[in-house]
Image (tube, rainbow, N blue to C red):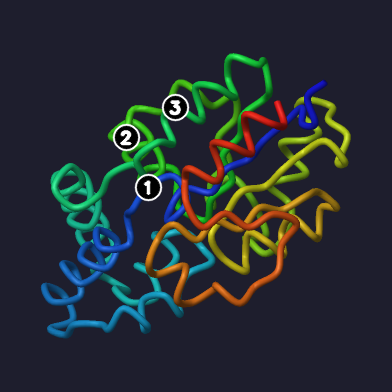
């Protein structure tokens, strides 16, 4: 008997190694419009709301052109700078075969989410994609998780949130569902390796074995 009726994934650092691309995209427009370069830590400190909110805060009257340049860089450099973590396509395929509802809940905006999910060729696996543009309150608010559960009338005891940061774990706790912390990205392992969650996976192989035993 399967233990889950719904599984929700974060994107950055969870499905795909995108941090390098994100940092480069923000600095691409920062250097052009602000004549400065941000450290990775400075960029991470802005995470929570989607990219457009951050760009508006930084760019003011240059927002429209900076936004265009950001997403153009993000899309054209994606294949060179970002990829799905090896083994996850197989894991997602296995979940889908067992008729479990699959969701995305990410702080990314709609545009970058779609770019990444299509680039790593998993877009069509997901039944519902909830981005930072689709909620009033961003992670760690559980609003996106609630939307997913309400859409498919799921019991919170049978839903799992998979993410790589404290925002994902706290959102899961707020929704009363189980959480899985994934630490297969170097950035996440260094920043969030101390966190506690219902499940912790240090490698995709560990996650694949978990999926095999629980669906």
Which quadrant holds residue 200? Answer: bottom right
Which quadrant holds residue 193? Answer: bottom right
Q: Can you tell which of label 3 and label 1 is closer to the viewer?
A: 3
**Where 90 sits versus 50, above or below?**
above
Do callouts 2 and 1 mark residues in contact (Cβ within 8 Å)? yes
- Disc 3: which residue: 90
Could you give the CA–CA distance between mark 3 and mark 2, rounded to whole angstroms? 12 Å
Left or right: where does residue 207 sit relative to residue 152?
Answer: left
| Secondary structure of residue under mark 1 | strand
Tag 2: Cα neighbours inside 10 Å, few (<14), some, or many (≥20)? some
- Disc 1: which residue: 16
Question: Which residue occupies 41% across, 43% down?
Answer: 113
Q: Nearer the viewer, residue 170 or 128?
A: 170
Quadrant where the C terminus is found in the figure: top right
Question: Which residue occupies 68% across, 22% down?
Answer: 100
- Disc 2: which residue: 120
| Secondary structure of residue under mark 2 | loop
Question: Which residue occupies 71% across, 36% down?
Answer: 148
Where residue 125 sits: x, y (%)? 49, 23
């Amino acid at each position: 008997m399967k233990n889950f009726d719904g599984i929700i994934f974060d994107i950055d650092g969870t499905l795909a190694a995108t941090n390098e691309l994100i940092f480069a995209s923000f600095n691409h427009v920062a250097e052009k419009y602000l004549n400065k370069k941000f450290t990775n830590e400075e960029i991470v400190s802005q995470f929570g709301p989607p990219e457009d909110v951050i760009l508006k805060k930084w760019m003011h009257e240059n927002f429209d052109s900076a936004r265009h340049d950001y997403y153009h860089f993000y899309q054209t450099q994606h294949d060179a700078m970002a990829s799905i973590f090896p083994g996850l396509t197989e894991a997602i395929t296995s979940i889908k075969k067992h008729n479990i509802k699959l969701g995305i809940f990410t702080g990314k905006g709609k545009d970058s989410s779609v770019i990444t999910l299509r680039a790593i060729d998993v877009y069509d696996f997901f039944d519902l994609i909830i981005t930072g543009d689709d909620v009033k309150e961003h992670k760690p608010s559980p609003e996106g998780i609630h939307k997913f559960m309400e859409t498919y009338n799921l019991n919170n005891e049978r839903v799992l949130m998979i993410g790589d940061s404290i925002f994902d774990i706290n959102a899961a706790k707020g929704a009363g569902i189980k959480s899985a912390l994934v630490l297969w990205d170097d950035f996440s392992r260094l920043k969030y390796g101390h966190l506690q969650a219902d499940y912790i996976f240090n490698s995709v192989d560990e996650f694949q074995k978990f999926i095999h035993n629980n669906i």
